[in-house]
């Protein structure tokens, strides 16, 4: 029997799920032939609570989302965090710097009492996560790679090196050399350094690389007359939940 796959959205723009559909015809037919998609609000109305693999998009920002996520975890044999919000908390965690009352009044005004919110957190702060597909949004190639590995019963072999490595391979001019700031030295690669290649900088949407070489990163900052605080402010865009503290060590 084909494994049953379900997609679920929590607090997010749902762009990661939509981008997962951005496959060519051959990949779509191959995926549909290999799995039974039983829950995917973006593409079908009928749904089932019987599934083997669950893809979760979005961070957890409401009390009501916690038992829902726990129920999904209890059902799924494999749970995959899909995208930056699910993996690190993403941009939603920027709100954690403010009180809930302040946020609700600022957004909803007199109607604030009709809404509730809690500090945003990634999926793994609530339930165990088996695999991560990182990025904002994740690359289609990486999504396909993870799905194929899961179908073969293998552990996905995902990058654990900094974005700087991909910049060197691609021949990109270093953002620091261009007079800008970048958090590629401590951010997990796998995106082919697409932002830097497009003339921008790394935003850190894929989260910290394991065991980041923070001493080397600090040396780079010193060489270009930058402070750690300047970099941390940019890193907080996607990683303000917990990982920024690791960079401060």
Image: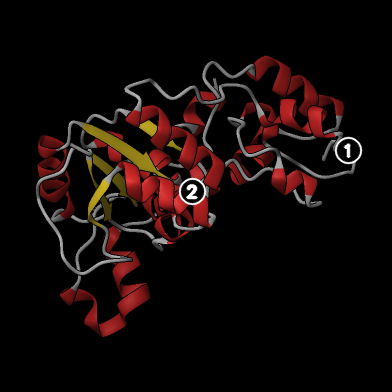
Q: Nearer the viewer, residue 190 or 108?
A: 190
Q: Nearer the viewer, residue 93 or 140?
A: 140
Q: How is the image coloured?
A: secondary structure
Q: Quadrant of residue 72?
A: top left
Label 2 CA crowd tier, 10 Å (few <14, some 14–19, many 20+): few
> x, y (%) of residue 85?
41, 48
> x, y (%) of residue 58?
34, 52
Q: CA distance from mark 2 to mark 1?
A: 34 Å
Q: Nearer the viewer, residue 174 or 1?
A: 1
Residue 91 appears in the rendering: no
Q: Residue 27, which numbered label?
A: 2
> x, y (%) of residue 192?
69, 37
Closer to the N terminus: mark 2 or mark 1? Answer: 2
Q: Residue at x 39, y 20 (%)?
A: 155
Q: Nearer the viewer, residue 102 or 179?
A: 179
Q: Residue 183, which numbered label?
A: none
Q: Residue at x 49, y 22 (%)?
A: 157
Q: Quadrant of residue 156?
A: top left
> x, y (%) of residue 84?
46, 45
Q: Residue at x 43, y 61 (%)?
A: 18
**Element at label 1:** loop
Q: Residue 173, which numbered label?
A: 1
Q: Say whether marks 2 and 1 touch (CB < 8 Å).
A: no
In what quadrant of the picture does the N terminus appear?
top left
Residue 81 appears in the rendering: yes
């Amino acid at each position: 029997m084909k494994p049953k796959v379900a997609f679920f959205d929590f607090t997010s723009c749902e762009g990661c799920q939509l981008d997962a559909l951005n496959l060519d015809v051959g990949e779509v037919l191959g995926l549909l032939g290999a799995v039974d998609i039983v829950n995917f609000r973006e593409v079908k109305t009928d749904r089932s609570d019987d599934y083997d693999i669950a893809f979760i998009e979005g961070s957890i920002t409401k009390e009501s989302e916690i038992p829902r996520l726990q129920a999904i975890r209890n059902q799924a044999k494999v749970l995959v965090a899909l995208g930056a919000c699910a993996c690190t908390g993403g941009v939603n965690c920027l709100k954690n710097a403010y009180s809930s009352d302040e946020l609700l009044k600022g957004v909803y005004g007199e109607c604030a009492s009709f809404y509730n919110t809690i500090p945003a957190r990634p999926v793994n702060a609530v339930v165990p996560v088996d695999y991560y597909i990182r990025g904002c949004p994740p690359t289609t190639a990486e999504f396909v790679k993870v799905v194929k590995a899961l179908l073969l019963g293998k552990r996905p072999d995902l990058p654990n090196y900094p974005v700087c490595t991909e910049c060197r391979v691609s021949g990109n001019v270093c953002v620091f050399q261009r007079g800008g700031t970048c958090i590629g030295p401590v951010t997990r690669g796998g995106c082919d350094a697409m932002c830097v290649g497009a003339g921008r900088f790394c935003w850190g949407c894929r989260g910290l690389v394991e065991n980041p070489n923070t001493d080397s990163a600090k040396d780079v900052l010193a060489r270009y007359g930058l402070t750690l605080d300047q970099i941390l402010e940019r890193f907080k865009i996607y990683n303000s939940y917990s990982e920024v503290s690791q960079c401060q060590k």
